[in-house]
Each structure stands twice: as structure tokens, then as C-alpha cells.
Image (spheres, rainbow, N blue to C red):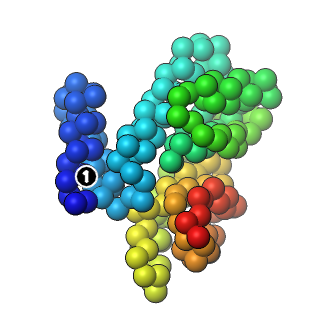
Amino acid sequence: MKFYQAIIVALITTTLLNACAPAVVGGAAAGGAAVYDRRTIGSFVDDEGIELKARGAIIEDEDLNRQIHINITSYNGIVLLSGEAPTEELRARAENITRGVEKVRLVHNEMTIAAPSSMMTRSSDTLITSKVKTSLFGIKGLEGFNPLRVKVVTENGTVYLMGMLYRNESAAVTERARQVSGVQRVVKLFEYLD
């Protein structure tokens, strides 16, 4: 059944993106991730749409887009905004635009008031994200746990964890993330299944 769900996601993604080569590869990767995901196929596709629509709406606001650095991550209709905005007004504007996107249930606005981060900081965050994701494969003794169910986002050394987990899974994931070098803080944004 999971195999067929993965194929459906890949086909939908490919069709929606007009079958360009990157979409085929991306669709296959998304389909593979969907096999292990606790979200429904519909929620998985909705989350991709939320991220694209929010990003598009922010790009249309040229003044906002020019002044901020933003990452938009959606998981089961819950959106994490991370990055930097130079003023509270711009931070709030990004949040309001995102809240207006169809199927957004909740927005966690974790953008800081600061100048956009440097490429060096962003590269460091990418490395931290990779190290956290890899470290999750070392979690043992949790029946049914799959580290691919955890979405990891890093911004300026702060690691945000998203997903649909049981509390014992959340505790193990959080503890493992805290042990990764370079992690300054861990923020849990999980939906709990128990």
C-alpha cells in the first residue's frame, strides 16, 4: 500500500510541475519520503503547496522579499517561518501573508529581528541540519520509530523539529538533537499522537 502511495505522490507532483526533469527527480524523492510519513498523501501534497504559495506571495511583495531572509516549512498544515527580518513590521507582514494561504492551520513565526544572515551562517546551518538528521538514525529501542518522520530545520544554530510523533519518540529525538555539535538550542514543534 505504501508503495502505491509513493507512486501516486510522484505522479501528482510530476503532473503538477509539468514534467520537467527536476520535478521528476524531486517527485520521486518526495514520493519516497511519503512512504514513511504519518501524514496522509493529501496532507503531504498540501504542505508542498502551502510552502510554494507562501513563498510566491512573499516574492510578489517586492519590498518584503528584498529585505528579509525567510524559510517556510509546512508539516500537516502547521507552518514554521524562520529567518531574519530587519523590523517587526516586516516580520509580521511575512506572517500575515503566510496565514492567508489556504490550508494553513497554524503559524509559528520564529523569525528574528536582525539583518539577513550571511551565506557562511546558512552553510553552517545546512551542515547542522544534516548532522542532526543523520544522528536520528542512531536512535534505537523505539518500536515503529522512523527518523524520516522528523522534519529538521536549522536557523542560526537553533534546530526546529517538526513531525507527528509519540511523546517517547519526541523525547529521544530532542535529546539526540541536543547532542549534535553546533546546536545551540532545540525547539520542538511536534504534533503528538498520544
Q: Which percent across, then down, holds residue 187?
A: 67, 58
Q: Amino acid at mark 1?
A: Gln
Give the image location of residue 183, x and y in percent.
63, 62
Q: Where does the image place residue 14, in percent across and percent down from the top left?
A: 23, 34
The residue that label 1 is drawn on is 5
Q: Which residue is drawn at the image coordinates 78% and 23% (left, top)?
A: 89
Q: Residue furthest right?
A: 88
Identify the residue at image location x=64%, y=41%. 106
Q: Residue at x 53, y 28 (%)?
A: 102
Q: Nearer the viewer, residue 178 or 172?
A: 172
Q: Is residue 177 visible?
A: no
Pick whichever, 63 or 99, lies toward us.
99
**Whole-percent x, y for residue 170 in the image:** 58, 70
Tell me the quarter of the picture where residue 33 sits. Answer: bottom left
Instruction: Look at the image and tell me whether residue 16 can be seen.
Output: yes
Circle 1 packing at 10 Å, graded few (<14), some (14-19), many (20+), is some
Instruction: Give the number of callouts.
Output: 1
Please name the residue shown 61% across and 25% down the image.
100
